[in-house]
Image (cartoon, grey):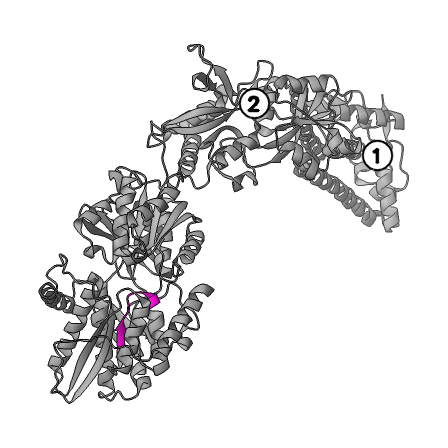
Amino acid sequence: MANIMNRFFFLVLIIASELVFVSPGVESASTNVNIEEVTKIGAIVDANSQMGKQAITAMKIAVQNFNSDSRNHKLSLQIRDHNRDPFQAAMAAQELINNEKVKVIAGMETWEETAVVAEIASRVQVPILSFAAPAVTPLSMSRRWPYLIRMASNDSEQMKCIADLAQKYNWRRVAAIYEDNVYGGDSGKLALLSEALQNVSSSEIESRLVLPPISSISDPKEAVRGELKKVQDKQSRVFIVLQASLDMITHLFTEANTMGLVGKDSVWIVTNTVANALDSLNTTVISSMEGTLGIKSYYSDDSSPYKEFSALFRRNFTSEYPEEDHFHPSIHALRAHDSIKIITEAMGRLNYNISSPEMLLRQMLSSDFSGLSGEIRFKDGELLNADTLRIVNVVGKKYKELDFWLPNFGFSKTSSKHNVGDISSNIAAEGFTGPVIWPGNLINRNPKGWAMPSNQEPMRIGVPTRTFFEKFVVIKDDPLNGNSNDKNLRYDGFSIELFRLVVDHLNYDLPYEFVPHDGVYDDLINGVYDKTYDAAVGDLTILGNRTEYVEFTQPYAESGFSMIVPAKQEESTWMFTMPFTWEMWMVTAASFIYTMFIVWLLEHQSNPEFRGTLKDQISNILWFAFSTLFFSHRAKIKSNLTRVVVVLWLFVVFILTSSYTASLSSLLTVRRLEPNVTDIHSLKSCNLKVGCVDDSFVKKYLEEVLGFRSGNIVPFGNIEANYIQKFENNTIDSLFLERPYEKVFLNKYCKKYTAINTYRFGGLGFAFQRGSPIALDISRAILDLSENGRLKTLEEEWFKPSSECSADERYSIRPENLTLHSFWGLYIVYGATSIFCFLLFVIRLLNNSWSHQETYQGNVSAWNIAARLARCIHNRKGTINNPARVSALDLAPPALESSSSRWEYKLSPTHPPENLQVELQMHE
């Protein structure tokens, strides 16, 4: 960039030193020497190109229209040819300013020409109307070139449109092509494209082809062929032409067709520098571009002003340039016409007093009207509204228009920015309006933008020969063929069968051939990266560092690794206590004792079976409580309150015994292995040996992440017999295997080993070259097979457990101990109800005791009442001489009589009721 600027300033200095360089002027036929006031307007264009010819015709029409409508003021159009050379453009500007005294200069189709003219014009304060704009607008442009007005937008929106196309069709790698400008650069378009691709679609520019300026080479055909050879060995087939002259476009597409780069699954995109001039190309060049997508600046062609202008333009253009076969106005002609209108309207607002260049510039910048090229409004010297872009598709000898791309909205089926949200999303999902014709007459699907395999050149797929388990990949000689070369090997295994199933699921043919890879897995990944293989299929673990080199598909199996340790059948002398936790046992025992006490309190007063000596009472109540556990109690219950408590207790017992029985049965029937080692910390603290496969990322993970000493890690070959041998001879105490291999291992050796401490990773997948669209198609197919159950069926076929490791036994889950939390509600209901019954019993007893106190008017202190209650509960036989101490229960006959005893009451008729004495006699 510094070199470009140095050359630019050097050019300006040369121009400034040569003050006068007169070139012949081409004065419009409309100039009238008899007009008193004539304003001269300069035009610097490429008079030999169709673009320049259209600009000249359009500006002449605008000048003619103004001159015919104005009586006192006329315009004189001074045209100069820059011949595609910025130096000549600068000299032409110097001549127009110094000799012709022009008030405004318009034209300049490239930014290189505009920059040098703007530098000269800004020094002498002559407004410049440029048909070009830089790829990136510098922030200081308006201060550096205050008299420059740009009638075109920069290229940022156009590059975003290309990035949206790449995202829409999943083109991950592209090749950028541009013709070098005179300053040796791409005008900043390459950086804009790279940034847009990364921001929108995560794509990237894989290669760039720099074509020399067409004017600087003698053999364009050979120069183009030399550049195109650089991409023949690349996989990407998405070519984006950023900038090129029409002559260079002719050679580019001719040679690309010859070299087979414009074929099936290839994509060609041209920017507006080429697409805007498609109408100028002859039919032969257009035919070589068939299937190309172009991005044009959109303008409305159905308005009345446009139709009037178009009719007049065609007539004048064919008359002045009969050799040109295309006579429809392009966007350049429309901008040229609008530039004259900007000048004339500004002059009119100043009453044609344009002695002040600053006032004229200010009025030009305040323009606000709908021109033929679109809305004309300026901000900071640039069009306020970014261009609406139109996607076109070259078909046959012409092109057809597809849909629109709107800044800040994306793709749309209408040029209006109103209500385009749903439309834009529909285009992203369904595609453009009408079918798109792609290079090579590709039908039924979109191009991959990738060098797809063919029957002549099938995709080379590397397959590991040293796999951990033959369940995943097994390579054997084909018994039907006696040869032992690579093409006569038989490939089998879960990973191989899955890949074949996925390929059959694709909606296009994918020719491929397996190539055995005798090496470690990382070397296989590197083989895909350096293009030795197009892909790799097998039990490949998806790791972060590997994704920097290849692109993995959707995981088809869970990955990670587990610690495999020897185990023995769990046996315990106290197995019968395991159904309940210790908290549960403690609460159950407490409930048992509590029930004994409540029943004794409620029955002791009225039930003789709960009376007697202390020893008898304890033994009877214990026997009653234990018998309820087996529902074999035979003691008769006298109190209704006791019956309520006992019923609830029996319900609690029923729930507990049923749960205990079920849990103990599960514990005795479900096999459970007890590992010899419980965690990684015990391995490291005891300095025990651990094993892993030498061709695996696990060894590095054990050292760097889990902190194992390298001396305690025993790597060995990936042969199944090695695992068992290392365990049996006590070489290792644990084995670290990846998750898929752990499943296969335990399906066969579930009786002696178990897995603990799983560490998860990305999974197993297939590897493709970065940017390959086939990887995304394979991922979608894997998801489809997973959703429809075919992947699960394939797993069941290949990973059947052995007869002694059935699925039910291998994956049975040991039941957990029953906790207090599961029965907390039951205990609360039982405890609350039993306490309520006890309180009722106490209240009735207190009530009867209070009645006797009123009758006999004894001592009624709280202490005496409590003592009397305790005595009433405990004492049952003998005579009570103090009436004040007789409770209601002492006076009342028992509700039920026992078969072995009876009660007799003797009342003395000579004593009044208040001197009542009761003699209680027990007759056995």
User: Does the segment drawn in magenta span residue 106?
Assistant: yes
Q: What is the x, y in percent for residue 198?
A: 45, 52
Is residue 885 at least partly visible in the picture? yes
Which of the 4 image quarters holds residue 84? Answer: bottom left
555 or 570: nearer the viewer: 555
Left/right placement of residue 316 relative to residue 116 reads: left
Please report the residue visible at 36 percent of the width from the left and 32 percent of the height from the top. 453
Above or below, 432 against 304 in this view is above
Spatial separation of the CA atoms under disc 1 and disc 2 = 110 Å
Is residue 789 at least partly visible in the picture? no
Left/right placement of residue 527 relative to residue 325 reads: right
559 or 140: nearer the viewer: 140
706 or 799: nearer the viewer: 706
| Residue topped by disc 2 | 466
Q: What is the x, y in percent for residue 860?
A: 86, 50
Q: What is the x, y in percent for residue 540?
A: 53, 31
Query: Is disc 2 surrounded by few (<14), some (14 to 19) or many (20+) residues within 10 Å?
Result: many
- Quarter in which the C terminus is drawn: top right
Please report the residue visible at 76 percent of the width from the left and 33 percent of the height from the top. 684
Residue span colored magenta: 105-113
Q: What is the x, y in percent for residue 830?
A: 69, 36
Above or below, 171 against 597 in this view is below
Query: Is disc 1 surrounded by few (<14), some (14 to 19) or many (20+) residues within 10 Å?
Result: few
The type of residue carrying mark 1 is: Leu
Q: Earlier in the sequence, mark 1 or mark 2?
A: 2
375 or 616: nearer the viewer: 375
Give residue 907's mark. Answer: 1
- Quarter in which the N terminus is drawn: bottom left
Classify mark 1: helix, strand or loop: loop
The type of residue carrying mark 2 is: Arg
